[in-house]
Image (cartoon, grey):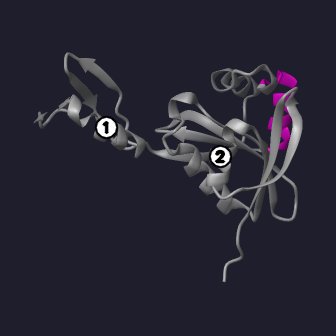
Amino acid sequence: MTWRFGSDLFVIPNLFRDLVFWLMNLGLKAPPCRRGSLLWIRFLSPMKVTLREDTHPDPDFYYQQQFEIYHEPYLIWDRETWEAVLTTCDVYRIEIDGRYGGDVMLEDRGKGIKYIVDFSVLPDYQGKGIGRSAVEHIKKMTRQLTAVTRKETLHFFLKSGFVLRKTMKNYYDRGVDGFYIAFERKPEK
């Protein structure tokens, strides 16, 4: 293994590829590219993830972002739906190093209960702990969270402390069920 100090490029033999990918999963940004039998990695500082309230959300921005995240037609909202959601919900941007990386939209249901209307992370940032970090933050903001999610994301929420309350057949589309989930913060002793 060779290290060139004073530079952010390291030459790593393929033998260490698993270690590099493991480090990437810990949140280090490391876009790989092959050069012969070596793997060149550029290490940057760990990603700074911020959940910031968007007090003046732009419907056109969120309308366009959904096409980067969702590919199933039944998940795409029209502009009018975005306008309604953005005017009735608390909107939080998930920012990675100051750039948009996803969003969380919460509807206040009263008595300390928030309903997750939308929770999304851009594909480039999925699987890196960013969603989990955002969920942990919003869990601290309220006594109880509820949502309806899809089969593809159900496991993520269950691992994050939510419990399955109800399966709703054909909720999203014919043959696409919804899963009503809830998280309740335990009272502090």
Up/down of 154 relative to 122, above or below: below
96 sits to left or right of 90: left
In primary-sequence order, the first of circles 1 and 2 is: 1
In the picture of the structure, the residue carrying the numbered disc 1 is 18
**Label tally:** 2
Q: Which residue is mark 2?
A: 155
Q: Is residue 93 magenta?
A: no
Kindly check if marks 1 and 2 are in contact, taking CB atoms under 8 A apart as contact: no
Q: Which residues fall within the magenta stretch?
A: 76-89
Residue 7 drawn at (x, y percent): 17, 32
**Residue placed most toward the observer, 145 or 177:** 177
Q: Hey, what amino acid is under mark 1?
A: Asp
Say above or below: 160 vs 76. Answer: below
Q: Residue at x 82, y 39 (%)?
A: 178
At a point 76% along the width and 27% down the height, the residue shown is 59
Label 1 SS: helix
The amino acid type, in three-letter code, at marker 2 is His
Dominant SS of magenta comes to helix
Viewport quadrant of the N terminus: top left
Q: Is residue 183 above or below residue 29?
A: below
